[in-house]
Image (cartoon, rainbow, N blue to C red):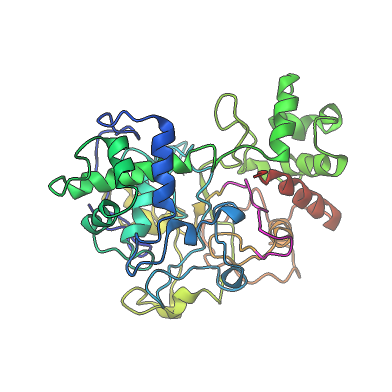
Amino acid sequence: MKKWTYLAAPVIICAAFLAQLSARGGAKPAAIEELGKRLFFDTNLSSPAGQSCAACHGPSTGFTGPDERINETGGVYEGALRGRFGNRKPPAAAYGGWSPRLHRAEGEFVGSLFWDGRATGDILGDPLADQAMGPFLNPLEQNLPDAASVVRAVRGSDYADLFRQVFGPGSLDADEDPDRIFGNICRAIAAYERSAEVNPFSSKFDDFWRAATAKGLEVDEIGETGARDFKGFGLDDRELEGLVLFASKGKCAECHVLTPAAEGLPPVFADYKYDNLGIPRNPENPFYGQDKAFNPDGRAWVDKGLGGFLETIDATKAYAADNVGKHRTPTLRNVDARPSPGFVKAYTHNGFFKSLKEVVRFYNTRDVVGAGWPAPEVAENLNNEEMGDLGLTGDEEDAIVDFMKTLTDRR
């Protein structure tokens, strides 16, 4: 099993598609989800012990960064070993299970997970399970040296019997292939991350979407039809105004699409594609001061995003230059989830923005002379079609923010 880090993309191992739940185990979904939850919150799966997946993906913030002090500055979280930092803000671990495997469609890369798309699904047949592999073996995150170390920690846990229940007798035996067991560990985490607990679709918007859909209305057409037919389904007039702007003048729904995630499910507000939004460097990113063993470029380091990953793979090197600076479109679900009203969250891949209002204003005015935004970190491959000079008023910006607040799950 190859190590996954923020610094170098993994070697992609071609493998046949593997089902999330091992046929050997045949466990009920509830059991594998409970196992995944125990793994997700286990602070013993790091070196030194003390850091779980939840340290960077907290439920109270929509399964993204839960530490306000960090969010207020660089937005990048410290790993298990003191002084080591990754280079990007934690993406949300919720609502990622619908992303397909990385592929090209109509000249664009689609699917995969991580901001730079390196969890392609080519290892375990599932991008979400591939993503779960990365932090355990990343020296800047949970810092375990190899798959066998993860397996030993799970074998000594108080949920080892649950693992055997899920994946079968002998599935944790010492003579079992540690890479196989590690794969099952990550499939279980993916099962939890796909569970109703993590993806409840319980927001105010979801109630609205279900009520409107039950009446035969297509919510993804609201930008063309306007709000009139959608009144009385749960969103107030201000939130409806924001949704209409989101889907029309604001062009948000061009990438954060309103099409259903799957039949019978509301949207996850992501098209699974990649864009360079022209986001400035975050000067407070602690990765700039990282040890040269991990960041030899120091403050000259540039986040190449998807292009940086593609250039490490022979099969995709030819596409790297056209994708430098592009990062994955994140879900907007729980984008305003926070443990208290004044809690500060960090936004975008490098945590440059600290409020939804700031993000919307940037989308609206990035290219407006005198708007005062710093230069993009990467000037190539900018998205100039869906953002930059949208002509939104300040009040319209606020309305879009008010709509996005309706995407917070009720827990």
Give the overall secondary structure of the magenta segment: loop
- State the residue lying farthest toward the left: 175
With respect to residue 64, does 213 lie above or below? above
Residue 327 is inside the magenta segment: no
Most foreground residue, 358 or 28: 28
How far across and down, in percent of the image, does residue 324 sit?
Answer: 45, 58
Q: Let me know if residue 106 appears in the view.
A: yes
Q: Residue at x 62, y 47 (%)?
A: 332
Q: Let me know if residue 110 appears in the view.
A: no
Side of 41 relative to 279 (left or right)? left
Side of 145 relative to 355 (left or right)? left
Residue 342 is inside the magenta segment: yes
Most foreground residue, 38 or 405: 38
Q: Quadrant of residue 163?
A: top left
Q: Residue at x 30, y 36 (%)?
A: 165
With respect to residue 214, does 269 lie above or below? below
- The count of marks equals 0
Q: Quadrant of the C terminus?
A: top right
Magenta range: 331-344
Most foreground residue, 119 or 144: 144
